[in-house]
Each structure stands twice: as C-alpha cells, then as structure tokens.
C-alpha cells in the first residue's frame, strides 16, 4: 500500500468511523480545533429555541404583558444560551466526534426542543404572575444537562492532567441542575423562584471561573471558542431576516408592493448585515489566544448578545403585528426596535472593551454618533404618533414606521462606517499594546487606552 493510500485510508477512518476514541490529543500538533458539521447542526436547534422565544415575547407584548413577557423571555434565552455555552466549552476541549460524543450531542438537541415546547406555558405562567420555570422546561433542561455531566465524568476518567477540573465541572453542573429542578417541582411564589434561579446562576458562574483559575485550565482552544460563539451569533441574526420577511409579507398582502415595503425590506437586511459586520469588528480569536484569562467576561456577555439579537426580530414581528391591525402604538413599536438594537451596539463596544482592557474618552463620540439615529427614531415616533393604535392605512403612520425602521438600520451603518474610517487604527494599536513580551508579560500601554471600534 502506497503512502498516499495509507493516508487516505486513515482520513476516511477518522471521518466515517465513529467508534470510541480517546479524549486527549484530539487535535494534531500545529493545527487548531475545527468546527464540525455536528456542532453546526447543534447550533441550528438552539437558534430555533431563540426564534420561538422571540415569537412568544412579541405575542406577550402585543397582549399588554410587557414586563412579564420580557422576564419570561430573558429566562428562556438564558436557559438555552447557558446550556449551549457550557456544552461548547466542553466540546472545545474534548469534542472527539466519536459515537458517545455524537449521541450525547443529539440527546441535548432533543432537550432543547422539549424546552421549546414548554415556552408557551412559561410565558403564560409569567403573565399570570406564576413561576416561569414549569416542569416541561425543567425536563428539557435536565435532558440538555445530564449528558454534559456524563461527558465531564468521562473526561475526568481519561484526562489525568485535568481530572480535578473535569470532576469539579461535573459536580457543579449536577448541583446547579438539581437546584433548577427543585425550583420547578416545589410550589413557590414567582419572585422566590426567580431569586433562587438568579442565585444558582450567579454561583455557577463564579464557580466556573474558580475552577479554571484554581484547579487548572481545561484544554479549550481559543480560536475554536471564538468561532463557535461567532457562528451562533451569526445564525441568531437569521431571526432578524425572518422577522423582516414576515413584516414585508404582511405589508404587501395588505397594500401590495410599495416604496414603504421596499424600504422596510432593505432596512431589515441592512440592519442584520450591519450587526454582523459590527460584531466581527471585535478581534475575539486573536485576543483570546493572547489573553485567555479574559474569556469569562467575554463569554458571559454573549448571553446578553444572544438575548438582544432575537429581540430585534421580536421588534420587527411587533411591526408586522401592527400592520395586520392590533393595539400597538407607533411609539411602542419604536421602543421595541430601538432598545434591542441599542443594546446590541453597546454590547459590541463592551465585548471590544473586555478583550482589549483599553479605554479612553475618544470612543465616546463614535458610540454617541451610533446612537443618534436611534434617538431620532424615538423623536419621529413621538411627533408622528398618538395614543391611538397604529393604523397601517394611515399614510402618516405608515411613513413614520418606514422612517423609524430606516433610522434603526442606520445606527448599525454608522457604527460600521465609523470603525472603517476611525476605529481600525485604534484597534491595531490596542492589539500591539496587548502583545505578550518574550517572557510572557504584557506590554505596558504607552499611553491611555484607545477607542472601541
């Protein structure tokens, strides 16, 4: 057998046979951890959960349950995002793509779908002032987390170097999951359940940092982590595109194609593209390789990013609801769009700041300029709107809605253009100051920080 044939057979065996494989040394020396098709399939299921939560919060707000709907939405997004985040952390270190890993991944996907089936009841319970963590969601979350516990125990058995950390992760997830389950089983007021869940989350977040710092860093790969988080963010933007499509379909069914319909379609796509562009202006992979200790604040901030992006889609869904005829006012629709878009913009700046650890006052004008169109959208809604529900057949209302959506999209454009003109050079200088010295020490900044992109 020739050398080429032997190499081909080895590659095919790795790609096509998924029997048990060791967890250590799964990445060949000199190569980075690659994203697998299974991980992409895994992401699609979780994004379905994001979309379902966005639909439910839009419906809750349309029905007048604003605070309860937002609370249930944040709970749902956190439950889904936290499970995804923790599994991705494991997979980056030990995702060997063998049969056990594949089955465990698929089981977690099933759990995510079970959780989605419990979302309508969760939002209904929240609207009634009851505990949003119903048994359906608790079971779905249990199905998502139990495979992860078993995978960490497997890692503890096979990876002697990181055994203490792997065992600590397994114990942490087990105790936290037990607490989550008890909040669903034991009857308690909604406020008590929410506080208990918040305490559990806070403890679990802190413990994970302590595990990596005190017991030893697990072998997660910075480039892989950055790519995985970026891909989930990218796929979540599909909710913005889907909501834009829905809004345009409703408008064209009512009034046919018009300048307004074209403007809304274009603005929605520009908004999605602008958010994508802005997010990837943060050099996450580069900085995580240089400063892996900064990963925790960076990854926890993504939970807010994943809440804000589908919420943009929820705002567009509310616009579609108003076009079909509802009780929403123009100002209400505008706020539902401005708040999540503004949150995404601020969070992108925050991600940059967390990784770069570099600050000064010069980034404030760029951030302010990015937020100006959002303020203008609110002003348009206040001037053109009334206390009456939005009327799609009213020329003024429809023109104002088109202007609002266009202004919201413009904010993302301003951020991207601002970085391309001004922010890029500041980012490069911040990277240079964060470059490690030959002895592993940081280069001290030569002057105060730099603006965010």
Image (cartoon, rainbow, N blue to C red):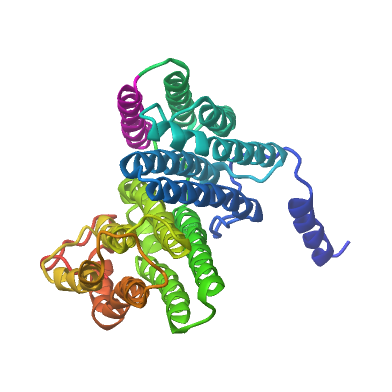
Above/below status of 259 relative to 190: below
Residue at x 32% of width, y 47% of height: 293
Q: Is residue 194 magenta?
A: yes
Looking at the image, is 449 positioned above or below residue 21? below
Q: Is residue 139 above or below residue 449?
A: above
Write the residue at 43% across / 15% down. Answer: 186
Apparent side of residue 197 relative to residue 141 in the rendered image (left or right): left
Left or right of 83, for residue 445: left
Question: Residue 144 location in percent, x, y?
Answer: 56, 34
- In the rendered image, residue 402, in percent from the top left (x then y), is placed at 37, 75
Nearest the eye: 310 or 148: 310
Foreground residue among 53 and 84: 53
Q: Quadrant of the N terminus?
A: bottom right
Q: Main secondary structure of the magenta part?
A: helix
- Which residue is outermost to the top? 186
Question: In the rendered image, which quarter is residue 310 located in?
Answer: bottom left
Q: Is residue 156 visible?
A: no
Quarter of the rendering containing residue 342: bottom left
> Which stretch appears magenta?
189-215
The C terminus - image quarter: bottom left
How many numbered discs sit on the rendered protein? 0
Q: Is residue 368 left or right of residue 49?
A: left
Residue 253 on image: x %, y %: 56, 71
Does 305 appear in magenta?
no
Q: Quadrant of residue 94?
A: top right
Residue 291 screen position, x and y as percent: 32, 54
**Residue at 34% in and 35% down:** 205
């Amino acid at each position: 057998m020739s050398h080429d044939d032997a190499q081909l057979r080895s590659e095919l065996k790795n790609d096509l046979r998924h029997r048990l494989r060791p967890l250590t040394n799964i990445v060949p020396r000199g190569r980075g951890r690659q994203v697998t098709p299974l991980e992409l399939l895994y992401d699609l299921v979780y994004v379905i959960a994001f979309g379902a939560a966005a639909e439910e919060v839009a419906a809750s707000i349309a029905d007048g349950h604003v605070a309860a709907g937002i609370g249930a939405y944040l709970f749902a997004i956190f439950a889904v995002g936290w499970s995804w985040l923790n599994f991705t952390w494991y997979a980056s270190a030990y995702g060997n793509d063998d049969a056990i890993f594949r089955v465990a991944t698929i089981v977690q996907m099933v759990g995510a779908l079970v959780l989605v089936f419990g979302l309508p009841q969760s939002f209904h319970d929240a609207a009634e002032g009851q505990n949003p963590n119903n048994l359906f969601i608790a079971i779905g979350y249990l199905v998502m987390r139990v495979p992860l516990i078993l995978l960490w125990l497997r890692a503890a058995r096979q990876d002697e170097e990181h055994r203490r950390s792997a065992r600590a992760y397994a114990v942490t997830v087990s105790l936290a999951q037990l607490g989550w389950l008890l909040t669903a089983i034991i009857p308690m007021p909604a406020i008590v359940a929410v506080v208990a869940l918040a305490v559990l989350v806070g403890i679990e977040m802190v413990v994970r940092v302590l595990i990596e710092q005190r017991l030893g860093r697990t072998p997660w790969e910075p480039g892989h982590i950055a790519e995985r988080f970026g891909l989930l963010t990218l796929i979540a933007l599909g909710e913005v595109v889907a909501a834009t499509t829905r809004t345009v379909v409703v408008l064209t069914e009512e009034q046919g194609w018009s300048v307004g319909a074209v403007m809304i379609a274009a603005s929605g796509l520009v908004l999605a593209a602008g958010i994508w562009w802005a997010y990837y202006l943060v050099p996450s992979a580069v900085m995580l390789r240089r400063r892996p200790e900064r990963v925790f604040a960076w990854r926890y901030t993504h939970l807010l990013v994943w809440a804000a992006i589908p919420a943009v889609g929820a705002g567009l869904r509310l616009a579609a609801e108003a076009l079909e005829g509802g009780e929403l006012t123009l100002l209400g629709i505008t706020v539902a769009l401005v708040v999540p878009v503004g949150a995404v913009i601020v969070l992108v700046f925050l991600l940059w700041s967390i990784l770069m650890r570099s600050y000064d006052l010069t980034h404030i004008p760029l951030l302010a300029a990015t937020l100006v169109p959002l303020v203008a959208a609110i002003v348009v809604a206040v001037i053109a709107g009334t206390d009456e529900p939005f009327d799609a057949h009213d020329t003024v209302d429809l023109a104002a809605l088109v202007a609002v959506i266009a202004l919201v999209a413009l904010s993302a454009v301003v951020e991207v253009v601002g970085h391309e003109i001004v922010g890029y050079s500041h980012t490069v200088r911040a990277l240079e100051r964060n470059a490690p010295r030959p002895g592993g020490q940081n280069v001290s900044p030569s002057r105060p920080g730099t603006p965010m992109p």
